[in-house]
Amino acid sequence: MAKIYVDNIEYEVPDGKNMLEACTSLGLDLPYFCWHPKMHSVGACRQCAVMSYRDENDTRGRITMACMLDANDGTRISINAQPAKDFRAGNIESLMINHPHDCAVCDEGGECHLQDMTVMSGHNYRRYRFQKRTHNNQDLGPFINHEMNRCIQCYRCVRFYNDYAGGGDFGVFASSGRVYFGRSEEGTLESEFSGNLVEVCPTGVFTDKTLHKHYTRKWDLTSAPSICQGCSVGCNILTSERYGKLRRVMTRFNGDVNGYFLCDRGRFGYEYVNDEQRLTRAAQKDQNSGTDAFSAMKDHLASNPKLIGIGSPRASLESNFLLKQLVGADNFYNGVSAIENEVVNEVLNVLVKGNVRTPSLAEIETYDTVFVLGEDVTNTSPMIALALRQAAKNLPKEKAFALKIQHWNDAAIREVVQDEKGPFYLATPYATKLEEIATSSVHGNTKSLVQLSSKVADLISKGGDHQEDNDFAYRVANALTLSKKPLIVSGCGMMSKEIIRCAANIAGALRNAGKEVGVVFSVPEVNSLGMALLGSAGSLDDAILQTEKESGMTSIVLETDLFFRTNSQKANSFFEHSGKTILIDSLENNSTPNADFILPAGTFAESSGTMINNEGRAQRFYQVFKPNNDIKSSWAWLDMLMHQAEKERNFDAIVEEMANSVNAFQPISGLAPHADFRIGTQKIPRASHRFSGRTSMNADVNVHEPKPPVDEDSPLSFTMEGYHGKAPSSDIPFFWSPGWNSVQSINKYQIEVGGPLHGGNPGIRLIEPSESGVSSFEVNDGSADNGKIEALPSWFIFGSGELTAKSQAIMKRIEPAIISVSSATLKNSGIEGNGKITINSGEQKLTLPYKVDENVPAGVVLIPYGLADTMGITFPIYGNISMD
Amino acid sequence: MEKPLTEHIKNDGTPLSLKEYEAKGGYEGLKKALKMTPAEVLTVVKDSKLRGRGGAGFPTGMKWSFVPMGDNAPPVKYLVANGDEMEPGTFKDRLLIEGNPHQLIEGMIISAYTIGANMSYIFLRWAYHLAAKRVLAALDEAYKAGYLGKNILGSGYSLDMDLHTSVGRYICGEETALLNALEGKRANPRNKPPFPQVSGLFGKPTIVNNIETYCNIPHILAKGAEWYISISKSEGGGGTKLYGASGKVKNPAIWELPLGTTLGEIIEEHAGGMQDGYKLRGLLPGGASTDFLTPDHFNIKMDFEEVAKAGSRMGTGTIIVMDDKTCPVGMCLNLEQFFAQESCGWCTPCREGLPWTAKILLALEEGRGKPEDIDHLTFQTHYNAPGNTFCALAPGAMEPLQSALKYFREDFEEHIHTHQCKYKH
Ligand SMILES: Cc1cc2nc3c(=O)[nH]c(=O)nc-3n(C[C@H](O)[C@H](O)[C@H](O)COP(=O)(O)O)c2cc1C
Ligand code: SF4
Ligand code: SF4
Ligand code: SF4
Ligand code: FES
């Protein structure tokens, strides 16, 4: 700890901080622009100026940038001294001379850090009388708007996009007053993390294009704490609504998970919520809809038909749990293919039985050596890729720290680090984007990757020095053995149980060698691991066999499009063999025409629930609004069906029942405050105290103000009434603090800047390894059928996600479905010229155009996962290819 | 009067060849140095009281002593010669490079040996095409003669040297921006600490010195520190200094004179005084980024201490003379437009403040000045003071302006009140 003095008051602060961090952590208000709690200091904007004094006898002091000043024992500054105040006011005035002052039409208005800092710094009268410089703006693609004239040249955007996230198609151009931030030429931003520019930029240069289509000011939005459903990482998000439409998704800081950032799938993949294909009415095939339809369903269930339930990894734990209760454990199936079910169960198996810990997303950034096996994390769990990019800088950074360069001295650290990365190794079926930062990488089919990784595990177990051998497996084994904190990353992307085991075995061997090792698995969907923990009687394939065996059962299909999960033959067979089918889902899809009854399910925007991410972290999401139609949380429908009731029990009751009946889920009852939680007597408002238009919003329908809906399921209210102080960390609906209207107000919610939220970061880990856990799992490398072509999925951040792919902005980024194959493989199969190729395994057959990619291993073809033309395929396929 | 740096420069405009240089005692300093340990060479340089000629006058030996040495020192270190010389009014390094490139090269080799660098760069102003040609030719000769490359003169010490021609930005002369430029990055300066001696080029220990600074080194080694101190007239530093004068003097040129020669002697004797019909009103003693001095200051010695005491900086020692027929406001405008254009755009006061300053000065010159403009110009000089900005460019830019506001304030006021510039008629 260090004793510092701010305006003659003594404070104790942790060592190694700069004065801006220290003051901000102490709750003091000091304006800044270029400093970012995650990207640290570069001293460019000069807005954080304070007076610094040598000692208590120094009465003159000098202007110093707080962000570049060590908070050492005895550091003495003044924020309030007049020269510092004058400097900051003058600095803002200067920043503003070219600014267009177009707040009224700027999407940042009302949550603009520049507005806040201008007010805080006390500049209000414009003296500059000359012409402003102007810039041309660029079309940066479907996600991000560009209005360069609002730029205040803080350099945060390039520092995030290039230095932090590893982007290469963005930069800063020109000099002096003309500096320009954008691309060398107009075009779509290529980084998977481009959306963070919206939050990183302190003013309205980069704004959310999807929000712009239905723009609402922050103060008029109704917002809720939620969980991204885009992949298994479960990033914490804020959802915002007005007029029954989801308007945008923003980052909800969680120091254990995604911190300050999101990926573009998560941020822009929400638009399906507003889609015209939404199911909004309870309906009965060819008959009535609304209440009558639901009554008909109840009546049908009252006749006690034999039931079969299809659960879903994209539905909440509560919904799956209630379906399991309703149909009985023996009749409850996981709505994914047999192979996916097997692979995900294997992930759970090695995490539960193994002796290696799986780190949180935030912890991934702390490892020093990485081996990625089989997984294209950039496309399956993008934020893991961003975290790995940070991990790759850890060892190189040590060199800077050895030179006594401070941890916050960002540019100086980067100077020492240069382009050095790693050690970072990749063994995947195809070239992934992380190869940009890899020490070395290899590509192979399942069999060769299983052999390779088994060898790595073996070498580590044997210990010893393998320095002289240059073989890839040796090099990986050496690097991992030399590391203090190695990390093994894998996942379900290859749909191979053996790959999961191999990753676990490498991690286990390192654990046995005394390493502080971690293992990370990406699983296919937001609640895949939750489903595995809940347990089921089998996969969708098993369910289909069951219906074929015992036709006429009433099936209840929860948030599953069978045609996405399996081929149409099997899906059709399921519906044909089912008696009545009740489908609970949010969007029309190929399964809906086959249902006898439909119950419209809330998406994450209209429902609340719990999801378990790839780390085994249970996380709560809350509905942001109550829709004006039949839509309900799936668990609510199931509860009503189960109890033959007109109304569901409240959410807490269901969580309680679940926590009591599933051992693993016991901690979940303490995940977040219960619905009766009050601060004083008040609920937590989803709307800001400045929310406008409430009395008139519905006036086109009825001049009487409708009674606001009541939320019986959470401590949150749907209106602006309630406690406007800080909510418990799991229940923060938006970040705001007096004078801090932008996302920068997150500072005010943290114990220390960049640190955990007050009250602890939300979420509860359900899986911990045991010391006595297994370190080796049996591996069978006979996976590949000899002589056959292996078709593996290639993953796409934009397109492979079932629901996000139905969002307009995302749709503009989806690539056409094309098979990738190397020329050697084509030649071996006697294929020449342009056209389409067919892969045929007997059971599955698919014809698509192809492109040659020499990075694809011989004997392997890659098929994009989950696109309109490729959905329902079960990977891997072993077969042969021929020209169509 | 001894003129070690320039005495051998030929009058016919051609550079000294290697042969000619050797005939005049060239590379003797190097031979001597290679027989000493780096630590011994460093002691000689320290004792010589050589101070950097790039503008700030930092003691060269002390600068070098911060480079990590010994067995645990990083294996890769660099040495860089700063030949950016884009300071308006300054052209001394050009003379040294064009006239005697081997003197620079020899100085750099000795310096690199002292800090244990095996790679060195000459960073040259873009416009110095002739200098570039001559450096390349001299490098070629030096390599062939074994002064560069592996195992120099059988000493076991190796050094490579390369020429880098800049793209022509004033900020590239700032040593940390120079290093970024050399790495192929944007020429934004870096924060210090870490200093280049610890983390310089490509994050490795690096020394950057001015061209003239290096040119002193062979002579210090050849003739010793005592001799070097003896040829100076300054208390604070040894050696000679290249002084220059431009403007309406009779004989604008560069002269090598003892460090500490008085301002009056330089102007009156060497520059020959003012041209007929012109009176000296003020001068910038060391390039565009130094404060005005006036004829009242003719008695002061042109060295780092006395010029500072007089309220300016010796800078590069190349004097820009302002006569009585030149508008001080116009001269400031010219300078501030240059500095505004050359701002790297990294920090707010400079990026926004300098263009604003230039626009106000233009308004004054065009008769659009307003009474509050003087206050605003004064504000800019405070706002861009040292420490307030990220590097020294902006404070330097403010030096002529702040002193012009002090010495020639009535001219600014007159521009505002009469809505015109009287010098234009
Ligand atoms: C804007 C700016 C421009 C500079 N230009 C030059 C230059 O052209 N040549 C030079 O030697 N030093 C220049 N300097 C000074 C260098 O930063 C550095 O102090 C110098 O090269 C050190 O050499 P010395 O110790 O030999 O004087 C400049 C400094 C600033 C702030
Ligand atoms: S675009 Fe935004 S983030 Fe980038 S420099 Fe300008 S104000 Fe800063
Ligand atoms: S990484 Fe996954 S959970 Fe996180 S924002 Fe992206 S899609 Fe959502
Ligand atoms: S003062 Fe600031 S903007 Fe100006 S050149 Fe230096 S770093 Fe760049
Ligand atoms: S925040 Fe300190 S200089 Fe920008």
Image (cartoon, coloured by chain):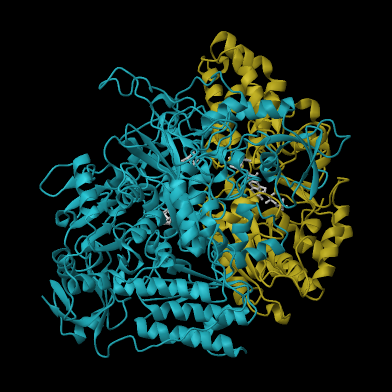
Chain colours: A cyan, B yellow
Q: Reply above or below: B403 against A171.
A: above
Which of the two residues, A877 or A194, is positioned nearer the viewer here?
A877
Quadrant position of residue A645: top left
* Horizontal and vertical percent position of residue A459: 54, 88
Residue found 52% across the figure and 59% down from its top: A666
Residue lying furthest front? A303
Q: Is residue A505 visible?
A: yes
* Horizontal and vertical percent position of residue A808: 26, 46
Which of the two residues, A501 or A646, is positioned nearer the viewer here?
A646
Which of the two residues, B210 or A738, is positioned nearer the viewer here?
A738
Q: Is residue A816 visible?
A: no
Quadrant position of residue B71: bottom right
Task: Judge left or right: residue A112 versus residue A83.
Answer: left
Which of the two residues, B364 or A224, is positioned nearer the viewer here?
A224
Quadrant position of residue B352: top right
Task: Judge left or right: residue A754 versus residue A854.
Answer: right
Task: Judge left or right: residue B31 versus residue A687.
Answer: right
Q: Reply above or below: A270 against A28.
A: below
